Each structure stands twice: as C-alpha cells, then as structure tokens.
Image (spheres, grey):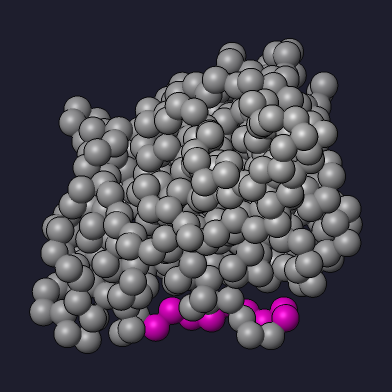
C-alpha cells in the first residue's frame, strides 16, 4: 500500500444539518469554497474530477461545484461496486471531506470486496444553502452519475459507470442518500444514515414529497443517530427523523436497523466499527456473481431481529417471537453481535491482533525508515512503535487524539475522515549513531491497543 503526503493542515468544523426555509436565489454570486489541495488525488490509484459552479445556472442545474476523489485498489481488474462516503452540510464538512478516499480503514473494506472508494467534496461556501446539493433533485444526482462516467474514462475502468453503490451519508449526506434511494433503488447495495435523513422533512411538508418505489424497500439500511440528539429535537431532526423513517420502512417490510449511539451527539464518533462490518455483510449478500447482473435480493428469513431500542442479542428471524414489522433487522450473526455491543456502550470489542508491518526499509544516509502495513479490518490502526536494537525509540503519533472517538493513526475528524496532513508510514531516526549498524523493528497497534507480532 502506498502512502501519500497531503499539503495543508486542516481543522475540521462541525457538520451542521440546519436548513433554511427556502433555497438561495443567487448562488452564482457567491464565491465558491476553495478546498485544501490534495496532490495524490490525481495520481493513481487516486482519480478525481471536478464540476465547477456555473456562472449562470440553468433551471435544474447544480448550483454548487463538487470534486469527486476515487480510490481503486491497486491490481484490481474489475470494480464490483463503489462505496460512497458523503459528507454533511457546511463549509467545514466540505473541506474536511477531501481526505475521505484516503482513509485506510475504509479502503480496506473496499479492497476486501473488490470495490472502489469515493469521497465527494462539495464547494459549498458559508453563505450557500445546503439543499442546493443535499437534495439530489437540485442537480447533484445527475452530476454524481455523470462524474462516475468521467472517472470510468480516467481510470480505465468502464464498469464504474454502471457499478452499484453503497451509500454512507452524514447529516446532509444522509438527507442526500435517502432521496437517492428513491431515485436509484436498483443501483444501491446498502445505505448507512449517519444522523441524517430527508424522511422527516417530506413528512412535515418542508420539501416536495417523493414517491417511494417498492424497490427502495428492498435495500438494507442502518439509521445511526446519536443518543445526545434525542432531547428537544423535532420529528424531522436527526433523531426523530431517523426513528420515524425506521418505523415507517420496517412496517413496509424493509430490511432496516436502528442503531443509536449512546455515547455521541451529531459527531460520527466510533460508528465506523459497526458501519464497516454492516457494509461488508451487505456487499457479500448482494453483489452479483456475474458482471452486469442485478443485485441479489435479501432473504429476510436469514436475517437477525431484535426489539427496537433494546440491547438484547438479536435472534434468527425464523426464531423471533416478537412483532417482526417493528423489530430491528440485521444481515448476519456477526453484525448482530457487533450491533448489540454498539447500542449498549458505543464500543465494539476485538480480540485479534493487527497484521504485522512488512517491507521495512532503512535509508542509512538519512535515517529514514519506511514500511508497509495491512489494515486491521475490525479495528483499524492507532499507532506504530519503532524499536532500535530491541529498545523503543518512537511511538507514532506522539500524541493520541481521542476527541471524536478512538484515536486513529490518520486522525479522526467530526465527520469520520482522516485529518490533514495524513500520517505516512515513515519515521526519521535522528539519534542513530553514524557508522554503527542498527536493527529496527516496527510494531502495529490497533485502536484497542492490541499489538502485532
């Protein structure tokens, strides 16, 4: 795996999911947001394409610019699907999202399933209304589809233009995903609603009420608001909207789960430790065996069920004694176990050590040590320990940042993306004695503190 240096330091802002009553009338007069530069985004295995904000947008045309960054696992011959990591509203969320496709943990999910990882970054200025992009009917759906065609051409992977999607959406990104679900149900493998959905807004009449096709109720879904969003929020907010959507969709027989995080508010925190196994299970169940074939249909009888807002261990659907149409649905026993842990404490356990680093190289003239590292699929990577002649000389990073959940080697933003500058698999030993032969060892540490061999 290659690591790449990013060029600017970024402090990510809170992803606000607040909408005004009407859309901005003259978005073309507002200066577009300047995103931090990411040099690696245009170098394989990264590919990018940008839609620029039009000077005089036509009716139905997207009024806000957007850059899509795609990562494809090296050596992958054919992309089976695209995992879309869609940020929330506000300029802080937009700039923080430029690293989404560079996230090592999400890349491991993509690699495991033969998929690409896509990180959209809208150029939303502070003054612009989020619904100009998070309501896909305002042009962002068409730009998204067109951009996949462009990325297919740039990458030499024509199948990207028609590959199915896993949609992860935070806040306004969840709003966007919930409406994309209704417009493109045949293209969507699964959806993760991270503190956001449009359901409460169309139910309240704040936006045009969409038609819900039957195919949309066949898509596996997970609604994940934070427990701290529960108090004092209207039905169309992150908590109320997510809960009402779950009840309505589950009554229609949809495979949907409700997974409130008892330890978070609107921030994403440690939701990835449930989201990644959820998507992994859904990709395994739904991706077709043959190129171009339709997505496989979920077998509801093979799922696992649990009472709504409980912390009980789910049961096989065929053995569940409660009301099936009000129960949380989960795709596998493994996901059921992880879900139970998550809704009880906000944490997920893992007893397996991370893979050992490989290809350790030392440039003795500069003291630079580099290595490669496979990513711990269950827990991600927190740190690396550097030993010289059997003694620890460095712990990377030097300081742990637990502000938004478990500390990750790449850092963690409010919106579940790495922070800039991205940490590389590199260390410079400035205290080595010149002319002396040293032996070095690199040890990986996952986010639960377990060390590699």
Q: Quadrant of residue 402?
A: top left
Q: Give the magenta range.
A: 291-299
Q: As rendered, which of 275 and 43 lies closer to the eye?
A: 43
Measuring 65% from the left and 58% from the top, which residue is drawn there?
358
Residue at image position (64%, 20%) is: 9
Q: Is residue 419 visible?
A: yes
Report whether residue 138 is seen.
Answer: no
Q: Residue lying furthest front in this view?
A: 436
Left-right relation of 71 to 416: right
Q: In this view, does 248 lie to the left or right of 202?
A: left
- Image quarter (top left, top right, bottom left or bottom right) of the N terminus: bottom right
Residue 300: percent from the left, percent from the top?
34, 80
Q: With 205 as the anchor, is 442 left or right in this view?
A: right
Q: Is residue 309 above or below residue 19?
A: below
Q: Main secondary structure of the magenta part?
A: loop
Number of residue marks:
0
Depth order, front residue of 132/419: 419
Residue 293 part of the magenta-drawn span: yes
Seen at 73% across and 49% down, the residue is 361
Residue 410 x/y as whole percent: 55, 38
Up/down of 70 relative to 113, above or below: above
């Amino acid at each position: 795996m290659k690591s790449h240096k990013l060029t600017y330091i970024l402090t990510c802002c809170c992803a606000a999911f607040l909408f005004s009553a009407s859309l901005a009338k003259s978005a073309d007069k507002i200066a577009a947001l300047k995103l931090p530069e990411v040099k690696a985004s245009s170098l394989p295995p990264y590919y990018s394409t940008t839609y620029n904000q039009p000077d005089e947008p036509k009716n139905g045309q997207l009024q806000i610019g957007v850059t899509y960054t795609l990562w494809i696992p090296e050596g992958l011959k054919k992309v089976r699907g695209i995992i879309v990591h869609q940020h929330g509203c506000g300029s802080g969320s937009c700039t923080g999202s430029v690293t989404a496709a560079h996230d090592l943990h999400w890349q491991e999910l993509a690699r495991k399933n033969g998929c690409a990882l896509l990180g959209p970054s809208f150029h939303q200025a502070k003054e612009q209304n989020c619904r100009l992009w998070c309501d896909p009917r305002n042009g962002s759906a068409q730009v998204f589809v067109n951009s996949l065609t462009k990325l297919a051409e740039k990458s030499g992977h024509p199948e990207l233009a028609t590959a199915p999607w896993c949609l992860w959406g935070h806040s306004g990104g969840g709003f966007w995903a919930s409406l994309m679900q209704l417009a493109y149900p045949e293209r969507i493998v699964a959806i993760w609603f991270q503190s956001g959905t449009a359901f409460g807004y169309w139910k309240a009449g704040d936006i045009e009420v969409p038609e819900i096709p039957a195919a949309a109720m066949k898509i596996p879904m997970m609604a994940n608001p934070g427990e701290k969003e529960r108090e004092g929020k209207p039905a169309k907010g992150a908590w109320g909207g997510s809960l009402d959507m779950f009840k309505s969709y589950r009554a229609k027989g949809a495979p949907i789960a409700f997974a409130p995080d008892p330890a978070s508010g609107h921030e994403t925190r440690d939701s990835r430790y449930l989201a990644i196994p959820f998507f992994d299970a859904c990709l395994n169940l739904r991706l077709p065996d043959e190129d171009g074939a339709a997505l496989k249909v979920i077998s509801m009888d093979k799922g696992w069920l649990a009472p709504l807002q409980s912390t009980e261990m789910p049961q096989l659907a065929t053995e569940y004694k409660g009301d099936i149409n009000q129960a949380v649905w989960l795709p596998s026993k493994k996901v059921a176990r992880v879900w139970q842990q998550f809704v009880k404490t906000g944490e997920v356990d893992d007893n397996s050590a991370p893979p050992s680093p490989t290809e350790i190289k030392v440039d003795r003239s500069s003291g630079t040590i580099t290595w490669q590292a496979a990513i711990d699929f269950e827990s991600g990577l927190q740190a690396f320990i550097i030993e010289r002649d059997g003694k620890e000389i460095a712990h990377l990073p030097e300081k742990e940042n637990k502000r938004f959940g478990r500390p990750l080697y790449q850092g963690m933003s409010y919106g579940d993306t790495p922070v800039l500058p991205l940490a590389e698999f590199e260390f410079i030993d400035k205290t080595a004695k010149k002319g002396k032969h040293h032996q070095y060892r690199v040890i990986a540490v996952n986010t639960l503190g377990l060390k590699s061999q």
